[in-house]
Image (cartoon, rainbow, N blue to C red):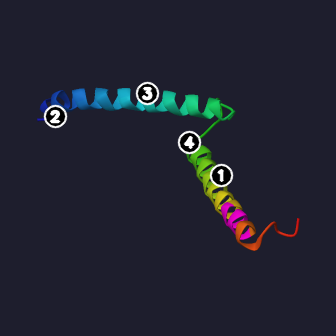
């Protein structure tokens, strides 16, 4: 029974190992692209910082768009 399970699960395990290797390589390329220290970069901290940056960037873009719209409505903004 156990050997039958192992025989049936072996291809899935190999597939998971290959997927993990691909994901690890993609993460390392991403970390290197963003100038993270590849040897010590951890996915959880890297992606949480990236998500925080994107949230702040989106907020800054929205603020800038709102400011530009207010300036268009109010004239030159006193310039």
> Horizontally, is 5 left or right of 57 in the view?
left
Mark 4 or 3, nearer chain start: 3
Depth-wise, is mark 4 or mark 1 nearer the camera? 1
Residue at horizontal 65 percent and vertical 52 percent from the top: 53
| Residue holding disc 1 | 53
| Residue holding disc 4 | 43
Give the image quarter of residue 38: top right
Q: How far is disc 2 from disc 3 in space, using C-alphas?
A: 24 Å
Give the image quarter of residue 74: bottom right
Judge whether 20 appears above or below 53 on screen. Answer: above
Which residues make up the magenta segment?
65-70
Q: How far is disc 4 from disc 3 in space, using C-alphas?
A: 14 Å
Residue 67 falls within the magenta-colored stretch: yes
Q: How far is disc 1 from disc 2 in space, using C-alphas?
A: 45 Å
Q: How far is disc 1 from disc 3 in space, using C-alphas?
A: 27 Å
Residue positioned most to the right: 79
Depth-wise, is mark 2 or mark 3 nearer the camera? 3
Mark 2 or 4, nearer chain start: 2
| Residue holding disc 2 | 5
Residue at horizontal 71 percent and vertical 71 percent from the top: 73
Measuring from the top left, give residue 3's x and y in whole percent: 15, 29
| Residue holding disc 3 | 21
């Amino acid at each position: 029974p156990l050997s039958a399970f192992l025989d049936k699960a072996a291809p899935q395990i190999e597939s998971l190992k290959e997927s993990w290797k691909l994901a690890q390589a993609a993460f390392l390329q991403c970390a290197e692209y963003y100038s993270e220290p590849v040897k010590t970069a951890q996915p959880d901290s890297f992606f949480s910082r990236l998500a925080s940056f994107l949230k702040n960037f989106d907020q800054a873009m929205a603020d800038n768009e709102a400011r530009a719209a207010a300036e268009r409505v109010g004239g030159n903004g006193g310039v």
